Image (cartoon, rainbow, N blue to C red):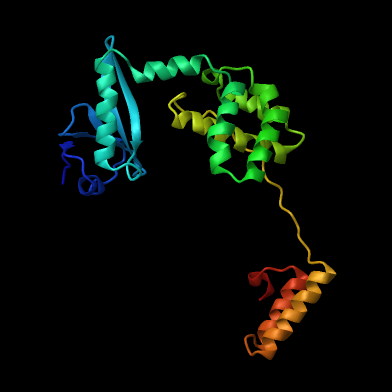
Amino acid sequence: MSEKRQFKFTKTSLAALEARDTEFFAWDTELSRFGVRMKPSGHMIYFVQYRIDGRQRRRKIGTVGVLTPDKARDAARKYLAKVELDNDPAEEKEKIAADITFTQFVARYIEEYAGHHLKERTANEYRQLLRQKVLPALGHYRITKIDQGKVALLKSQMSDTPAHANHALAVTSSVLSYAVSLGLIPHNPVYGVKRFPSPGRDRYLTDVELAKLGASIRNLQAEGAVTETAAHCIIFTALTGLRIGEAR
């Protein structure tokens, strides 16, 4: 059955939408130029569409499921009101983004995001990694000029320490994702840059850990919580390093 492309946005009507093989657009009947875009994955966003100087623009308002339809509609109405007053919010953000360097935005990220959403230790690690590794390579660029090529170059410059390179890419991605959420850049250029392969690591129990494991098993056996056969299996796999499937 075909779906209507125009209807009043409510939690129920949006939840009834089904994903298609291609992007699907629907329009709200309560507010002109206010729509929803659904990707084949089922992910949906609210957006507004308008024209400035003969050029069509489409700007994200929020994510369906995070914002209710009523709140998204109110935000869209305010956005469109600014457009009608010849004060395009998108152009304002683009001007801000064009004038800010990555170093300047990192300071904003640390203050506004890392300080509130990350643990203090993690925020400090991010700050140190950005200062020592990322900013020397990307700090002088305007954030609108950072692309996959520049991110890939950062990765290649750290090829001698692949684990640190991967961590640097993850932190850089967090910073630029925040810029995307603010509407300063259209997408995160770190996406699509492959990480270095993560080497496997062998882990062996120390003598102290083995002694503690043996004591714990004996206690469980005394309580009747572990059978003798199960206890032997645990000890065997601990000593040999075999997986359960390999030990059969």
Residue 147 horizontal side relative to residue 196, left or right: left
Q: Nearer the viewer, residue 85 or 91?
A: 85
On screen, 12 above or below 182? Answer: below
Q: Position of residue 69 (x, y in %)?
A: 25, 41
Which quarter of the picture shows residue 155?
A: top right
Q: Position of residue 108 (x, y in %)?
A: 56, 28
On screen, 223 above or below 40? Answer: below
Task: Please tell me which residue is depicted at 60% across the width and 27% down the height of the picture.
Answer: 107
Q: Position of residue 209 (x, y in %)?
A: 79, 70
Q: Nearer the viewer, residue 85 or 221?
A: 85
Residue 173 horizontal side relative to residue 22, left or right: right
Task: Please tell me which residue is depicted at 26% across the width and 46% down the height of the picture.
Answer: 18
Task: Please tell me which residue is depicted at 67% across the width and 25% down the height of the picture.
Answer: 135
Asked if one can make out residue 15 in the rendered structure from this viewpoint, the answer is yes
Placement of the C terminus among the 4 image quadrants: bottom right
Q: Nearer the viewer, residue 75 or 162?
A: 75
Q: Nearer the viewer, residue 61 or 168?
A: 61
On screen, 125 above or below 55? Answer: below
Which quarter of the picture shows residue 7?
A: top left
Which quarter of the picture shows residue 174?
A: top right
Task: Please tell me which residue is depicted at 71% across the width and 41% down the height of the picture.
Answer: 163
Looking at this view, name the residue that lies furthest to the right. Answer: 207
